[in-house]
Image (cartoon, rainbow, N blue to C red):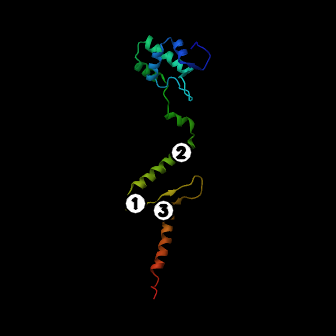
Amino acid sequence: MAGPKREIFKASDVCEMAQLQPYMLRTWETEFPGLGHVPSGGGPRVYRRADVEMVLRIRQLVFNEGLTLAGARRRLEEEAEPVRTESLTEDVLDEAAKSRLRDIRDGLQAILALLSRDAANEVHELRLVAPDEGPHVSAHDGARQAGKASKGSRTSKANRAPAS
């Protein structure tokens, strides 16, 4: 774009650079919602350099290539570079982090399976493993110990002789 070296432009400046009527720019703003920016303090819409470049590209698609505004929008979407999410984790994470994430996923799936079963019909054992710490701790063993302690206190009350 061979225009002024500014970064922010008024609508009249954009219309002059793109050789458009203001009503046409306002119409394009409805079809392309990201076009232009209303300042936080209010006031007229302003345009960044990227907005002006987009207006010039839309003008080329509409006037030179004969596309409708919807066709121009689709073309701009096609031209946008797609984001590769599947390779993002491969590039960023090392093998140890991937392994840890797989372990976490497997653990969460095991918890989901336990929660989805009927708790009254089965006794479940859930092993909680702290990373890089000693032996495995069983939540079931802890619950069993707590149950024995509470049963012991109940039986001692039940086995007492009634007061005469």
Q: Nearer the viewer, residue 148 or 127?
A: 148
Q: In this picture, is 40 found above or below 110?
A: above
Give, as a three-letter code, the residue at label 3: His
Determine which residue is flagged by label 3. Answer: 140
Which of the 4 image quarters holds residue 137?
A: bottom right
Q: Quadrant of the C terminus?
A: bottom left
Give, as a three-letter code, the residue at label 2: Ser
As drawn, the label of residue 119 is 1
Q: Secondary structure at mark 2?
A: helix
Q: Tag count in the figure?
A: 3
Give, as a three-letter code, the residue at label 1: Ala
Q: In this picture, is 84 found above or below 113?
A: above
Asked if marks 3 and 2 touch (Cβ < 8 Å), the reply is: no
From the image, state whether disc 3 or disc 1 is nearer to you.
1
Q: Which comes sooner in the sequence, label 1 or label 2?
A: 2
Which of the 4 image quarters holds residue 62?
A: top left
From the image, state whether disc 1 or disc 2 is nearer to you.
1
Q: Secondary structure at mark 3?
A: helix
Determine which residue is flagged by label 2. Answer: 99
